[in-house]
Image (tube, rainbow, N blue to C red):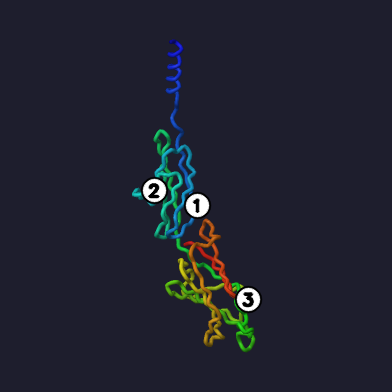
Amino acid sequence: MRIIYLLFFLLFIAGCSKGPAPAPTVAFGYNRNVFEVGEKIEVVNKSQNVTRYEWFIDSSRDSVKTDANPIFNGRTTVGTHTITLEGYNADGVKNEAVNPFQVGERRLSLVRITAVNLSRPNGQPWHADGSGPDVYVVLTSPTGVVIRTVDYTNVQASTLPLIAAFFNNSEPILRNGNWSLQFYDNNGGRTPELMFTMPIVLTAPPADRNVDGYGTYTFQSGNYAAKFEINTL
């Protein structure tokens, strides 16, 4: 009997000696620093000693998430947004972290014309005097908005790539859809002549986009090629 009492006593002592749960350390980040409008927000959880999570975005508790690594629907407005995490340990002690993130639109910051046909399809020079084409480029959006570059006179292999600057929109928004890039010879200021039309289909951000929203598209068709540099602003 004494042995049984002793066992109960030891169990009682062990139960009483159990200390509080470790304090929760609440921390998290994101899979990127800048997101596109509408792009899903992936959270990277770095918390410790947390057994229960409550996440909410932009101070809205209408859709609190409770999993460890939630994915939030993309934001519809450009600017700074925040996600808040309230983490609780096994004793219900709460700690909190708030992290901002940026949302922007995919913008065309620069176009490099890397290849053009320096002679006509029949092999003849573009101009009677043998000079190269006076190239300008027109970018047409899915809604028909036309953006024109400046002229580049007497284009030769040695002058490529051309760094295209646009007249009426320095950083157009590159939304998904069917675009076209048209190459013209301005013909020394006379009647412009269409050299080539390159169809461009955008369905997603550039594959090489970094966490800050910079990336490039490369397009090539026939003897024509262009490289788009994009930023997310």
Looking at marks 3 and 1 on the same chain, the residue that comes earlier in the sequence is marked by 1
Residue type, numbered disc 3: Thr
Where residue 172 sits in the image (x, y, percent)?
A: 47, 69
**Residue at which label 1 appears:** 31
Looking at marks 1 and 2 on the same chain, the residue that comes earlier in the sequence is marked by 1
**Residue at which label 3 appears:** 159
**Residue at x 60%, y 74% (from the top left corner):** 115
- Name the secondary structure under disc 1: loop
For mark 3, does the 10 Å Cα neighbourhood hold few (<14), some (14 to 19), or many (20 or more) residues?
A: few
Q: Above or below — where is 151 with respect to 79?
A: below
**Residue at x 41%, y 57% (from the top left corner):** 75
Judge depth for marks 2 and 3 and give the one in front: 2
**Residue at x 38%, y 52% (from the top left corner):** 58
Q: Are marks 1 and 2 in contact (CB under 8 Å)?
A: no
**Residue at x 55%, y 81% (from the top left corner):** 195
Q: CA distance from mark 2 to mark 3?
A: 53 Å
Where residue 35 sits in the image (x, y, percent)?
A: 47, 57
Left or right: residue 209 compared with residue 118: left
Q: Above or below — where is 46 with respect to 117?
A: above
Residue type, numbered disc 1: Asn
Which label number is shown at residue 56? 2
Q: Between 71 and 127, which is closer to the camera in this rendering?
A: 71
